[in-house]
Amino acid sequence: LGTLIRIGNEYLFSGDWWITIFPGIALVVLVLSVNLLGDWLRDALNPKLR
């Protein structure tokens, strides 16, 4: 995804903005999903929080 965003930067101002935006959105969704999964696992498996 990082490579797609880097390559898309060259086309950002030429009217082909979706080449950068869609991989960027996918990266944000991926990071948020992993973060939420980690929080859920911490809450579910930590006996001190129960």
Image: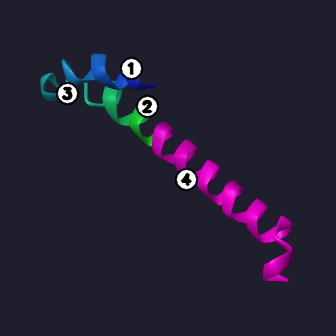
Look at the numbered disc 2 and give the secondary structure of its residue: helix
Q: Amino acid at mark 1?
A: Leu
Q: Amino acid at mark 3?
A: Leu
Residue receiving disc 3? 12
Residue farthest toward the bottom in the current orientation of the protein: 50
Disc 4 and disc 2 in contact, CB within 8 angstroms:
no
> Where is residue 28 shown, x and y percent of the image?
47, 46
Q: Amino acid at mark 4?
A: Leu
Residue 22 shows which numbered tag?
none
Disc 1 and disc 2 in contact, CB within 8 angstroms:
yes
Name the N-terminal-most of marks 3 and 4: 3
Q: Is residue 37 left or right of residue 35?
A: right
CA–CA distance in space, label 1 to label 2: 7 Å
Which numbered mark, 3 or 4, is in the foreground of this view?
Answer: 4
**Rendered residue at 46%/25% (across/down):** 1
Name the N-terminal-most of marks 1 and 2: 1
Q: Please say which color scheme the image uses.
A: rainbow
> Where is residue 46 shown, x and y percent of the image?
81, 70
- Residue 43 sits above or below residue 14 on the image: below
Name the N-terminal-most of marks 4 and 1: 1
* Residue 40 among those drawn in magenta: yes
Q: Main secondary structure of the magenta part?
A: helix
Which numbered mark, 1 or 3, is in the foreground of this view?
Answer: 1
Residues rendered magenta in the picture: 26-50
**Rendered residue at 81%/79% (across/down):** 48
Name the N-terminal-most of marks 4 and 2: 2
Q: Is residue 45 left or right of residue 38?
A: right
Residue receiving disc 1? 4
Disc 3 and disc 4 in contact, CB within 8 angstroms:
no
Residue receiving disc 2? 23
- Residue 47 sits above or below residue 26 on the image: below
